[in-house]
Amino acid sequence: MTHNAPRNTILLIEDNRDDEELALRAFRKNNVANDIVVARDGAEALHLLLGTAVPNEVNGTRKKLHPLIVLLDLKLPKIDGLEVLRRIRSNRETALMPVVVLTTSSEERDILESYRLGTNSYVRKPVDFAEFVETMRQLASYWLHLNEPPPDIPSARNSPTLL
């Protein structure tokens, strides 16, 4: 039987190891205590969200990941970020899940298509580490504290996040 996994996680979908490490360092620097799960390509992300990819250590059942927020890069191997977003929005269980596109792309077509497919926000990754840390602080502050999530996702205020 499949049940939803704990929902206090952040899903970071990022194929670039340097950007992944920057994001994780920025979260640590901002005292974000949520569990952070990293998917390194679009196929892995969809498997985590729509498949049965998270084992339950207590009883051996497998659970789908249902994070508080998805941080989605667009330029991904196997399945690109726009297709990941399309599939997230087309699935009844994930359609309302908050998704923030976090990418280096400033191409107008990527921005327009991301919003057309239903992203909640489009954020360009700053190159400067200090700016990146501040961007991640603001994202965490808004999405984990101020934003009121859809009813099927517990309030971020009840998660173990610190800022």
Image (cartoon, grey):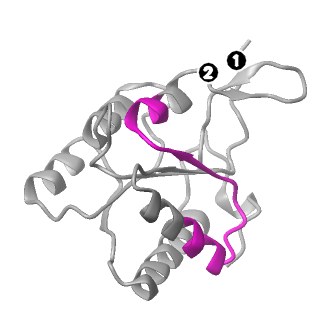
Q: Position of residue 68 (x, y in %)?
A: 59, 50
**Tag 1–tag 2 contact (CB < 8 Å):** yes
User: Mark 1 falls on what kind of element?
Assistant: loop
| Residue 56 drawn above or below residue 124 | above
77 falls in the magenta region: no
Residue at 67% x, 70% y: name it.
32
Residue ID at (72%, 74%): 162
**Residue 141 versus residue 114 in the image, above or below:** below
Judging depth in this view, the residue of 56 and 76 nearest the camera is: 76
> Where does residue 144 sit, x and y in percent of width and height?
59, 64
Q: Tell me the residue at 46%/43% (across/down).
A: 40
| Vertical comparison of 59 with 159: above or below | above
- In the image, the segment drawn in magenta is 24-46
Whether 103 is drawn above or below 98: the answer is below
Q: Amino acid at mark 2?
A: Thr
Q: Is residue 13 left or right of residue 144?
A: left
Q: Which quadrant of the view contains residue 86? A: top left
Residue 52: numbered disc: 2
Q: Mark 1 sits on what residue?
A: 2
